[in-house]
Image (cartoon, rainbow, N blue to C red):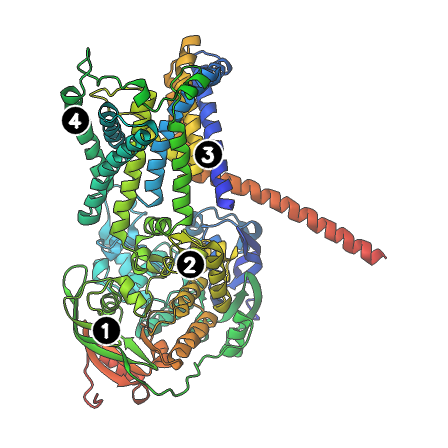
Amino acid sequence: MKIKSNAFLIAISAVILGIIAGGLLMLAIGSNPFEGFYYLFRGSLMNMERIGNTLATAITLMLVGLSVAFAFKTGLFNIGASGQMLIGGLCATLVAHHVFIPRPLYLVVLIGAAFLGGALWGVVPGLLKAKFNVHEVVATIMMNWIAYWSIYYFVPAYLKGPSLETESKSIALEQTLRSPWLTELFGRGYMNLGIFIAIIAVLAIKFILDKTTLGFELKAVGSNRFCAEYAGIKVNRNVVISMMIAGGLAGLAGVTYYAGYSRNMQIGVLPQMGFDGIAVALLGASNPVGVFFSGLFFGMLQSGKGFMNAMTEVPPEIADTIIATIIYFTATSVLFSRFWDKVGRNRRDRADRRNETASQAEEVHHEQK
Amino acid sequence: MVGTERMNHVIEMLHIRKEFPGIVANDDITLQVEKGEIHAILGENGAGKSTLMSILFGLYHADRGTIKVRGKEVHIASPNDATDLGIGMVHQHFQLVQNFTVTENIILGMEGGFVLDRRSAGKKIKALSEQYGLSINPDSVIEDITVGMQQRVEILKMLYRDAEILIFDEPTAVLTPQEIEELMHIMRNMVKEGKSVILITHKLDEIKAVADRCSIIRRGKLIDVVDVATTSQAKMASMMVGRPVNFKVVKEQVSTGDIMLEVQNLGVSNAKKLPAVKNFSLTVRSGEIVGIAGVDGNGQTELVEAITGLRQVDSGKILLQGKDLTHASIRDRNESGLGHIPEDRQKRGLVMTSSLGANMIIKEYYRTPFSKHGILQEEIIDKHAQDICDAFDVRSGEGIHSHAGKLSGGNQQKAIVGREMWLEPDVIIAVQPTRGLDVGAIEYIHKRLVEHRNKGKAVLLVSFELDEIFNLADRIAVMNSGELIDVVETKQTNEEEIGLMMAGVRSKEVAR
């Protein structure tokens, strides 16, 4: 419990410092920071449509963040979420164009295909690590480029749109994650059923990590593989499973992005969100619930920055700068935890002294009696 | 001497208090070291000795209290400040660059100008080495010299920096009996030359051998400062632990039974793919403790790793109660009744960043009652951990929810021993089970191992401390460069003979 509140304080400190740094930058370029932030948050929360779009952005960030966080928990650095997203998105797009079955069943197939695609892209680095000790950072980066060029080939060859060579044909609305009632509720924006995927994934991952033997094994391997090995846990098997689940989660991010937020895939684009997920996971302290909220926050920054730019002189890059600053402060979180420890200690000391004085006073009182 | 120089305190730490979350490591401790004395600090693991010395050396900062050096109040913010004040520390883990020479290591960090002047540095080192009887060759490369020699390089490092006050943190933990003897001699030489020595230890015979006075710390509090010459070991031990201590393990005769563990013609390679264990055969019967004696690095680690499944076997067989486990998985071995108290508790024994509760089920989490259908049963897990902590006297700041890394070394070890014993394995392999522990914890763990034997189980004990082997083992197997030199009955041998065998001399008169 104590550790959790500490992580929370660190995250909040990082966010506040990031915002202050952003404000200083706005001042430096001669803009009014209060105005800048006003429009930044107004841009992401002004009306139901904007809120819906912010959520739609946040959904993908949460799932990618969850993918990175899950790998982190098991001692792995998944830098390949972009590629896993692409393959998840590709599988979903193929299903969307070719499978026509009743909607509830269809959604299961659509989401399952995306998960499996991402999982496949995660399993390969996992196996390479387990069998040949290839570092997962190298392997996942390579897999990113394999995904990138696969899309480059697949989309024009099999999913060509009517006019453009560089993107796939749009998925019919009823074959996406969009849902009429959500679209209505959120003023015809990009909001989609992905929000439920994200919530379920957050809860499922939390459950797996906290309550199951699988999570126990994964965490043991992640925290101390030598001890795990000693205890009879199959280290390599867990590395593969972990990368598979992490990849699957990024695949889910792919379906929410390519068949929810947007409706087609472009060639020659490695989604930036795959890397933003690292920031989301860091700020969320690799805790599934933390990732949920940090995903929301980054979603707000992402979707509000355009409006801020339109309404003020502040360039949208300021939002990215804030994100970068927050990552920086989260990464140097040791400083914060020291600071908060000290605050806590001073408070305790003061309390101690108060108690001492009180008890002394009491003694004196007794003696006088 | 105590009377005349009473006022001549070279170090004074007054009313030091240092708190860590959930624990007060130092509670109003006062330490006064006189010039030219060897002052021992005695305390159990986790009593606060290391914290106190880390404060003196500038690694931690006291919450309250003052430090005076040669009568002047000082603020020590970092080890550099300590060095400037003439305080030097020999750490338990040496801080040497393996492929540098002795001279290079010693001048590291104070090279002076742009061009290295190895020659004059070497001369100074040679002179110091002779003055204090260290017999160090300044041109040797660190990786070629023994652990004992490396420690002397650490000592020379301090002398080279003109340290007047030398702190030794558990200096004998890594030394052979002969090397310990030599270190004691070196300490006496230092005091003769006017230096002061602070010796942190929990080994009473060492204190008795060299120290003048001894400050005893228990649970963060200073218990007493005693004159070593006039205080018995038993008295000091009871002050340290807070109750009377038995040094000798009481071991009644138990008749041995069936063969529990059998190792046949085992061959194992080390990490460099060189043979580390050669044609090794050994049996351990129920109701006996077999001790493996030998100098560190003679194949003991590889032997244990092979038996426990952490390392591949090249040739030979491993049988547990007749069942062939040579190529079995680690889990199979665990389930077949093999327990293992690992050599390195930090690396293998515990997940430091996990709770004590999780660590206590790390071999059993997948079984009922700890999990059902893949779901962990928290209440049962917590109760299990609490039971082990109660039964094995594991103390921690936040109970079973403490991270294993927050526990003191002794409590970590007790937790591991507790976890392994709780499984009631038929054969337990205990490697250095009491390394770095204090007498209280050692006594406790020894008692538990003997109890295990008395229950008709088998214990294979690997230790680099002959005292421990002689105290516990019914039979002693001596290992030298991967080979079994001989197995002898403990009652029919002595330390001298075993010492010779450890050096590779096969005894002729002792027939198997």
Q: Amino acid at mark 1?
A: Lys
- Mark 3 to mark 2: distance in Å? 34 Å
Q: Which chain letter goes with mark 3?
A: A
Q: Are marks 3 and 2 on the same chain?
A: no
A175 w.r.t. B170: above or below: above
A340 w.r.t. B363: above or below: above
- Mark 2 to mark 1: distance in Å? 27 Å
Q: Is residue A322 visible?
A: no
The residue to which callout 1 is attached is B323
Could you say which disc has been placed on residue B370 in the image? 2
Q: Earlier in the sequence, mark 3 or mark 4?
A: 3
On screen, residue A31 versus residue A164, left or right, reads: right
The residue to which callout 4 is attached is A149
Q: Are marks 3 and 4 on the same chain?
A: yes
Q: Are marks 2 and 1 on the same chain?
A: yes
Q: Are marks 4 and 1 on the same chain?
A: no
Residue B392 locus on image (x, y percent): 47, 68
Could you say which disc has been placed on residue A11 in the image? 3
Q: Is residue A22 visible?
A: yes
The kind of secondary structure element at disc 3 is helix
Q: Earlier in the sequence, mark 2 or mark 1?
A: 1
Q: Which chain letter goes with mark 1?
A: B
Crowd rating for badge 2 (residues with CA inside 10 Å; few <14, some 14–19, many 20+):
many
The residue closer to the viewer here, A219 or B229, is A219
Residue A217 locus on image (x, y percent): 34, 52
Q: Amino acid at mark 2?
A: Phe
Residue B313 locus on image (x, y percent): 17, 66
The residue closer to the viewer here, B117 or B312, is B312
Where, by quadrant of the figure, is residue A291 drawn?
A: top left
